[in-house]
Image (cartoon, helix red, strand yellow):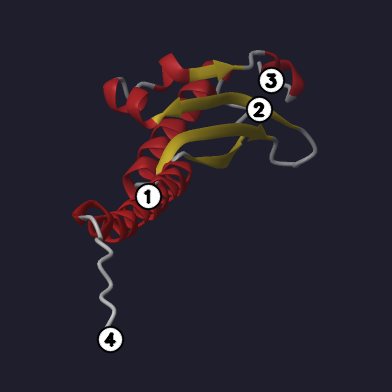
Amino acid sequence: MTMKNESHVSPNFSMAQPFRRLTKYLLVSAIATLSTIAIASSAAAERREVDIRLLVNQDEGFTVMTRQAEILARSAAQRTFDREVLVSDVSVKVTAQNLNQDQAAIILQLIVSRRDWASRPDPKIWATYFPMAKTLIGIR
C-alpha cells in the first residue's frame, strides 16, 4: 500500500520566497544608498578657514590697507573655491600687524558660500569690516 501525498502547494506560496528575498535586497540597497548620500552630503558641506597677516605700513592710510585686505580676501576665497571642490563655504580673516609685531587687529572677515561667491565674487558684499582696528594698531 502506497500513500500518496496529495498536498497542494499554491503558486502564490512558491513565489513568496523569491519575492521576500528581492524585497529584503531592495530594502538593504535603499538603506545603503541613503547612507552613502548622507555621508557624501556631509562631506560636501565643508568649510575652509583662511587666516592672512597684512603688515602695517605707517605711510599708507587705513583706507589703503582696507583695500589691500579686500584684494587679499578676494584672492584667497577664489583660490580656495578653485582648488577644493568639496568646500561649500569659506571664511577669510585678514589681520593687520605692526612691524614690531606687538599689536594686531582684524581688519575684515569674509564669510561666503560657494553659490553666493559664484553669483557675486565681490568681497565688499560678503565682508564684515572692523574699523576699530585703525585705533587698535595705531594707524592714521
List the single residue furthest toward the left.
11
Report whether residue 118 is seen: yes
Mark pair 1, 3: CA separation: 58 Å
Give how far across and how far down residue 4 sits, in percent: 25, 75
Asked which secondary structure carries label 4, the reply is: loop
Sort mark 1 into few (<14), some (14-19) or many (20+) by Cα contacts within 10 Å.
few
Q: Going from the N terminus, do you reach mark 1 or mark 2 first?
A: 1
List the single residue furthest toward the front.
1
- In the rendered structure, the answer to whether residue 30 lies left or right of residue 94 reads left
User: Does residue 135 sit above or below 15 in this rendering?
Assistant: above
Q: Mark 1 is on which residue type?
A: Leu
Asked which secondary structure carries label 1, the reply is: helix
Mark pair 2, 3: CA separation: 6 Å
Mark pair 1, 2: CA separation: 53 Å
Q: Going from the N terminus, do you reach mark 2 or mark 3 first?
A: 2
Q: What residue is rendered at 54% in x and 41% in y?
A: 50
List the single residue furthest toward the right.
102
Q: What residue is rendered at 70% in x and 36% in y?
A: 98
Circle 3 sits on which residue?
133
Give how far across and how far down residue 102 sits, in percent: 80, 38
Mark pair 2, 4: CA separation: 102 Å
Circle 1 sits on which residue?
27
Q: Are marks 2 and 3 in contact (CB under 8 Å)?
A: yes
Q: What residue is rendered at 41% in x and 51% in y?
A: 36
Circle 2 sits on which residue?
106
Give how far across and how far down residue 91 sits, in percent: 53, 33
Q: Mark 3 is on which residue type?
A: Ala
User: Does residue 68 sit above or below 133 in this rendering?
Assistant: below
Mark pair 4, 1: CA separation: 50 Å
Q: Tag on residue 1?
A: 4
Q: Mark 2 is on which residue type?
A: Ile
Q: Going from the N terminus, do you reach mark 4 or mark 3 first?
A: 4
